[in-house]
Image: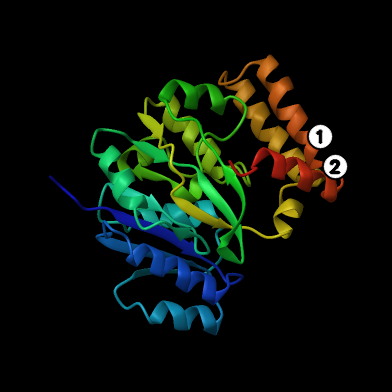
Amino acid sequence: MNKHYSVLMSVYDAENPVNLRQSIDSIKSQDFPASEIVLVIDGPINAGLTEVINSYPEIKRIQLPNNLGLGGALNEGLKHVSYDIVARMDSDDIASPSRMGKQFAKMIEGYDLISAPIWEFNESTSNIIGKRDVPCSQDEIISYSHKRNPFNHPCVMFRKSAVEAAGGYSSDYLYFEDYDLWVRMLKNGAKAMNLSEPLLYMRTDEGMYLRRGGKKYASVMLNFHKHLLNTGWTTKKEYITGALPHAIVCVMPEFIRRVVYRRLHKKH
């Protein structure tokens, strides 16, 4: 049995070097180690990040001359991974030691796309402030995708061949590059599931509520859901009951939006 998989990461200048080191160390501490780590350096970065990256000479580095954004950087990185099974990892998150092994065990059963719930934390993984659940079965995932993103992108493991067959990440929908890719993969017949156990700690801060709101974010979000509607993936009813309420939350004052998101992602 082929037991190889790659980890694909991207980092850009705004990342905190301490967070990057913690993220890489969590990958290197996996119960089921990665065969390689591919790190895309998305444009020029500061000396602190360079120092951290240089302390891991075994990492395969892809230096981009200009910042392409996450979707573009990951597309470049996919060109350089050596194995078909690829685990995504963000440069400020922390993977649980069993994450890769548990996801890989399912991938070799024939799945193309797998994620899991994630814990949201602030400063320390002992300070859990929320949890993002996801639907588990293929049917639940497809139904859920008509209104919301059915996968936690930082905790995804996928087949490179299935991603490429669906056209890879697109730059057409800012903030929703991953959601757009998952829908195209599902349309293409990808076999998907989510595990029920949280396998990743996602770093959050108060600025998260600003980034998830405002008129610009609401406009982009509605544009993406109109695309899903126009392509027949969703119905008018699903657009009205899913996208429109989300848009209303986006334009609410930040302190109200914070309450709404925290209730949606409350710990269980």
Circle 1: residue type: Ile
Tell me what residue is drawn at x 33 percent, y 50 percent. 86
Give the x, y percent position of residue 255. Answer: 84, 50
163 on left or right of 65: left
Query: Viewer-proximal residue, 146 or 201?
Result: 201
For the residue marked with disc 2, what is the amino acid? Met
Residue beneath disc 1: 248
In the displayed structure, would residue 142 be above or below residue 76? above
Q: Is residue 48 above or below residue 9?
A: below
Question: What residue sits right under mark 2 in the picture?
Answer: 252
Q: Residue at x 37, y 51 (%)?
A: 99
Q: Which residue lies furthest to the right in this view?
A: 253
Q: Is mark 2 on a helix, strand or loop?
A: loop
Corner quadrant of residue 159? top left
Image spot of residue 55 (x, y percent): 38, 82
Cα separation, mark 2 vs mark 1, equals 6 Å
> Is residue 6 visible to the viewer in this orientation of the structure?
yes
Q: Residue at x 33, y 71 (%)?
A: 59
Residue 44 appears in the rendering: no
Is residue 147 shown left or right of residue 4? right
